[in-house]
Image (tube, rainbow, N blue to C red):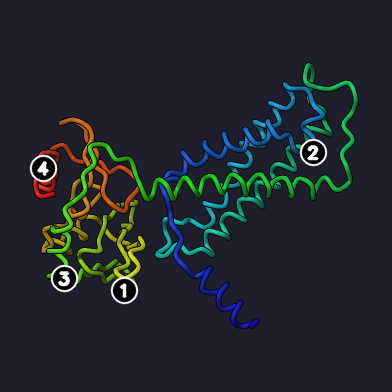
Amino acid sequence: MYKFILNKVYFFFKKEAILGELAHNTRKFFFIIIVLVFSLLFFFKPFLLNLLLIKTQLILSIGCSILAAMGYIIAISIFMPFNKKKWTVLMEFTTVMTAFFFGWLLIYGYLMICFKVNLPEPFIINEPIVIPENFFYKTLFYTLGTGSFVYIILYMYNIIKFDNGKNIFETNISNNILNETYKNPKTLKLNGKNKNEQLIINRNDFICAKSEGHYIKVYYLHHKSQRVNNYVLRNTMKNFEHSIIDYNTLYRCHKSFFININYLKSIIGNSNKSHIYIKHYPNRIPISKHKIKYLKDILKKFLSDS
């Protein structure tokens, strides 16, 4: 029984976790954390905030919110999820707990400075605040409670965005097109500059590839489970293009993106600036100006066939 539970836990933490839209947009994540944490602190008033004047509560809530977001930035900088070939549940759990830890220490230090020094007029209160001896642990309890609630909200947001995306003029691609390509499967072999970097998948499981500095992040479907995985290769987009030149369904729509045309969902914008949405990828993808017409023609074909 003991070994059975350990095996369950082991395989659970080895499972691949979803990196949703917010995980790809650190700046957006940072500001959303500030807003959520501030709302929870100001309205539920942990950390002895209920003893203070409203103006003081605002100062402390804003400060704690920024420091909570800073804890996330520190954690994400340590673990660097975008450079991982596989983002597992264990990695995500460790990153979240690290964010809580640094957020806790920063918030505790900030509150102690504010309470010991006493905020200047007109923000002080007439009677001094008596800080309990276990305030160090109280801040940990409140940080974990607040942080867990924020994490649940963000995780649910990621799942919703990842599953649905933003569908403007959305069209369902004809299943006949996808099924037809699966009748003649071809293996797609992608290599990085390092010898141990190699990804071999079915051509039709390829979703898109995104340039990230000196790396390329490939998103693909696990053929059996249909879960979205990603793999990071150290390579250039030019070399990547040469390796997939024989696959006419894989198209370079922008200097930083390759997509699988079979997963095209929608196009928004005009002839000067447009973006596309594809299945299984939560964010919009830019299109180079001279490639907009071609993709619109492809989309029209999908519409007429569906």
Q: Secondary structure at mark 1?
A: loop
Q: Secondary structure at mark 4?
A: helix
Q: Which residue is mark 2?
A: 112
Viewed as shown, does residue 247 lie left or right of 257? left
Instruction: Please state which of residues 238 and 45 is positioned toward the viewer in this rendering.
Output: 45
Mark 3 or 2: in front is 3
Q: Do the numbered discs 1 and 4 sit on residues whose CB atoms are within 8 Å? A: no
Q: For marks 1 and 2, give the CA distance.
A: 52 Å
Q: Amino acid at mark 1?
A: Lys
User: Which tag is nearer the camera, tag 1 or tag 2?
Assistant: 2
Q: CA distance from mark 3 to mark 2?
A: 63 Å
Who comes first in sequence, dot 1 or dot 2?
Answer: 2
Residue type at numbered disc 3: Pro
Image spot of residue 248 (x, y percent) = 11, 58
Say the numbered circle drawn on residue 300. 4
Please, is residue 253 above or below residue 119 in the view? below
Please determine whether, in this image, residue 133 is positioned above or below residue 206.
above
Which of marks 2 and 3 precedes in the sequence?
2
Residue displayed at 32% across by 67% down: 222
The three-letter code of the residue at mark 2 reads: Met
Q: Sequence order check: which comes first, mark 4 or mark 2?
A: 2
Mark 3 or mark 4, earlier in chain: 3
Q: Quadrant of the N terminus?
A: bottom right
Check disc 2 and report its element: helix, strand or loop. helix
Q: Residues within 10 Å of mark 2 (few under 14, many from 20)?
A: some
> On residue 185, which mark appears?
3
Give the mark nearer the N terminus: 1 vs 4.
1
Residues at discs 1 and 2 in contact (Cβ within 8 Å)? no
Which tag, 3 or 1, sits closer to the chain's start? 3
Where is mark 1, residue-wise?
Answer: 195
| Quarter of image, res 142 | top right
